[in-house]
Image (cartoon, helix red, strand yellow):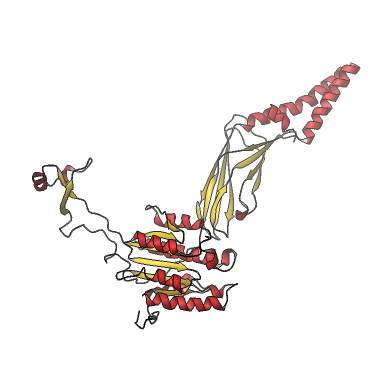
Amino acid sequence: MRAGLRALTSRGRSFLASGIAALVMAVLLGENDLFRIGVLITALPLLAAMVAARTRYRLSCARRLDPARAEVGGEATVTLRLENVTRLPTGLLLIEDTVPYALGVRPRFVLDRVEARGVREIDYRVRSDLRGRYTIGPLSIRIADPFGLVELARSFTISDTLVVTPQVVALPHVRLSGEWTGGGDSRTRSVAAAGDDDVAPREYRQGDDLRRVHWRSTARHGELMVRREEQQWQSRGALLLDTRRHAHRGEGPRSSFEVAVSAAASIGVHLAREGLGLRLVTDQGAEHLTDQGLSHSLLDTLAVIKHSPARSLEMGVSALRQGGGDGLIVAVLGAMEPEEARELGRLRHSGITAVAVLLDVSSWEGGDGTAAENQRAVETVLAGYGWRIVTLPAGTSIATVWPDAAGRGRYVLDPTGGAA
């Protein structure tokens, strides 16, 4: 009731003040009719406040995002579900959902009334040209009575998260020899070539199928031994993303940094769909990706990745070196110095395919002739170590230049005189 009185509108306060004044005058003048009018005028806002206060705590709200993960420039539908869980109909409901500025203006709706046990669903759309993780909610409701005497505000506590991921471009299939560690197509194979089951036994573990007991090994070792199950053999690769602020040019969605993030997302999703076990590394070190839903984990990580203040790729190169076991390394790079290219180039050795996606930062606003010279020098150095070079200028889709990752016609003479 106290909350309802605080929610009185200007009209409600005027009614209450008029009613009290009428009551006082009726007592002073001894006018019974005026007293009845005063009681009516005073009771009306009080009753409205009581009803509004009661309704305030008897609404439930749920929100659904479809999809919960949208691409930059794509739309998501937000569905609000309001339920009146009382036996009384509500009054006028003014609804406003909390939406970050990047997703557009705050949506506002008006519901005339919700009947007892009634349900209302409201849809609206959001979109963003900026990747990121955005919180939608909480929902606020202003409950008004039919006479406009009371307007009570309420905020729900629930909120949902919309992840706006980088733009992913479908890439053509390119034969990357060496991308599969040990060869093959990342199919299931046994640990040893001895039929469907590996005859090399291991000790029995709780939950193992007793039908897999290897009795000969059990007799030899004196403890229960079982045949190994088939093991999934998955190839591994690494994706390096250069996030250094000074290595990129331009601002906003068309900057070289955003293009680099989109290129990394496109390449990562493309390789993951081809069965490659992938890890993400930046100039700050290795990023954690979950094994389940690798593409989604990669996109969620890239959705919130930001510029770094680092001046070199030392930590990223170190993380790549420490990981080991990679059959493929793809590096998406901004402006570099030849010496940095040499450190990176040394990661490639026999059995590893290395692809460098070099953003031609000189083609972005703010680029200069020095950047173009460094670009050519870096290409020469990396190609000298056997890296395949993919050059990505401003305004060009990664899908257009990705076939260069096959390495045909992209080799450059080694600076020492040998052919790479």
Name of the residue lying farthest toward the bottom: 417
How many numbered discs? 0
Front residue of this view, candidates 389 and 338: 338
Q: x, y (%) of residue 62?
A: 54, 41
Name of the residue lying farthest toward the top: 30
Residue that appears at 13% across and 42% down: 223
Work out whether 336 lies above or below 298. below
Q: Is 219 displayed left or right of 121 in the figure?
A: left
Q: x, y (%) of residue 121?
A: 57, 44
For the N terminus, the quadrant is top right
Work out whether residue 67 can be spotted: no
Work out whether 2 lies above or below 108. above
Front residue of this view, candidates 414 and 237: 414
For the C terminus, the quadrant is bottom left
Q: Is 323 displayed left or right of 303 in the figure?
A: left
Work out whether residue 102 can be spotted: yes
Q: In which quarter of the image is residue 19?
A: top right
Q: Is 343 displayed left or right of 188 in the figure?
A: right
Residue that appears at 60% across and 42% down: 139
Front residue of this view, candidates 54 and 384: 384
Front residue of this view, candidates 6 and 406: 406
Name of the residue lying farthest toward the right: 29
Q: Is 99 displayed left or right of 30 in the figure?
A: left
Q: x, y (%) of residue 366?
A: 60, 72
Q: x, y (%) of residue 53?
A: 66, 30
